[in-house]
Image (spheres, helix red, strand yellow):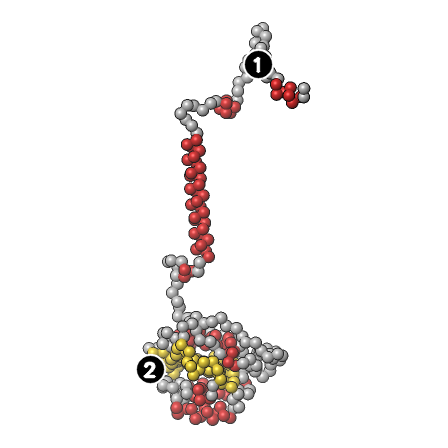
């Protein structure tokens, strides 16, 4: 017989009778062992208690999961999607994502080392700011080449001849323009005039800015102007920005306009709106157009 079989069939030592002459004290069981050995009292089943504990544990886990899911959901949402946390628009327009156009092979950006003439080699039409979301594009100014008369039409009739003569003498190379009207009633016109040299672009800028406070070279319908300080912090390296607005009291519409001097190109941004041209979209439009030219 194997040792395992002998162990399983042997009689426990406690069952062997002890001699009467040598009484032995029975060992006192430890409290924990006694408690484990004691049978449960009738009518006090532990199953209901265990089921209750299980239900409460499940409830806590479900609530915790719901709470964590809600927190993650709110974290993933935009601020404007969360009730009570929405922020009102500050008046800025929603423009498409902007990117500089590709250059011809071997060409440089206007303000990089090696491009001493500060020439814009990119397609001028690709440097025009696109219309914002919801705007109605002017079919006559849809981001293509245009004639000089398109720009001259922005000026008072008495000044068109003088400016036209300057443009004729300055070897103007290209004019590209885009225009639109937004739902708030603001009409925007952007003209990019590219010259054969920086000197000619600066010359036109000097001509129009010098005459502003003399009552000349003003946009059509404007009789008096003042400096528009809303764009004074537009900081694009190598560019200069000159902004003006129609001085009160004005008629049913107000005009704001800006000249952006960028190397061989002069940009003219004009906005007109009934009741008053708004500051925020004007500054935004001037800033973005300057960045495209920089």
Residue 233: % across, % down: 46, 74
179 lies above or below 24: below
At 40% from the left and 76% from the top, the residue drawn is 136
153 lies above or below 66: below
Residue toward you, 271 or 106: 106
Under tag 2, what secondary structure?
Answer: loop
**Disc nearest the viewer among 2 and 1:** 1
The residue labelled by disc 2 is 250
Q: In which quarter of the image is the N terminus?
A: top right
**If you read the primary sequence from the N terminus, does the residue marked by circle 2 or circle 1 appear first?**
1
Label 2: few (<14), some or many (≥20) within 10 Å? some
Q: In which quarter of the image is residue 156?
A: bottom left
Q: Distance between the residues labelled 2 and 1?
A: 119 Å
Residue 107: % across, % down: 60, 80
Label 1: few (<14), some or many (≥20) within 10 Å? few
* Residue 258 shows in this picture: no
Per the rendering, the mark at residue 38 is none
Per the rendering, the mark at residue 15 is 1
Q: Is residue 13 left or right of residue 244?
A: right
198 lies above or below 101: below
């Amino acid at each position: 017989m194997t040792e395992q079989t002998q162990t399983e069939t042997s009689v426990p030592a406690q069952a062997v009778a002890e001699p009467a002459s040598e009484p032995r004290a029975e060992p006192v069981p430890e409290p924990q062992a006694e408690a484990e050995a004691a049978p449960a009292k009738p009518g006090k089943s532990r199953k209901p208690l265990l089921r209750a504990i299980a239900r409460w544990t499940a409830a806590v886990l479900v609530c915790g999961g719901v709470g964590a899911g809600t927190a993650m959901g709110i974290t993933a949402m935009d601020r404007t999607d969360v009730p009570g946390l929405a922020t009102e628009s500050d008046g800025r327009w929603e423009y498409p994502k902007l990117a500089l156009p590709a250059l011809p092979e071997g060409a440089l950006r206007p303000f990089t080392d090696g491009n001493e003439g500060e020439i814009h080699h990119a397609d001028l039409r690709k440097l025009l700011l696109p219309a914002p979301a919801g705007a109605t594009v002017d079919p006559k100014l849809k981001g293509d080449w245009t004639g000089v008369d398109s720009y001259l039409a922005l000026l008072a009739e008495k000044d068109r001849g003088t400016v036209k003569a300057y443009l004729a003498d300055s070897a103007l190379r290209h004019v590209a323009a885009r225009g639109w009207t937004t739902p708030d009633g603001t009409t925007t016109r952007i003209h990019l005039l590219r010259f054969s040299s920086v000197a000619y672009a600066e010359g036109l800028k000097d001509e129009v800015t010098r005459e502003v406070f003399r009552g000349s070279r003003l946009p059509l319908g404007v009789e008096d102007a003042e400096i528009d300080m809303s764009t004074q912090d537009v900081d694009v390296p190598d560019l200069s920005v000159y902004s003006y607005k129609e001085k009160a009291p004005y008629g049913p519409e107000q005009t704001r306009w800006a000249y952006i001097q960028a190397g061989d190109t002069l940009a003219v941004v004009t906005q007109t709106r009934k009741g008053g041209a708004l500051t925020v979209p004007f500054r935004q439009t001037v800033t973005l157009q300057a960045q495209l030219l920089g």
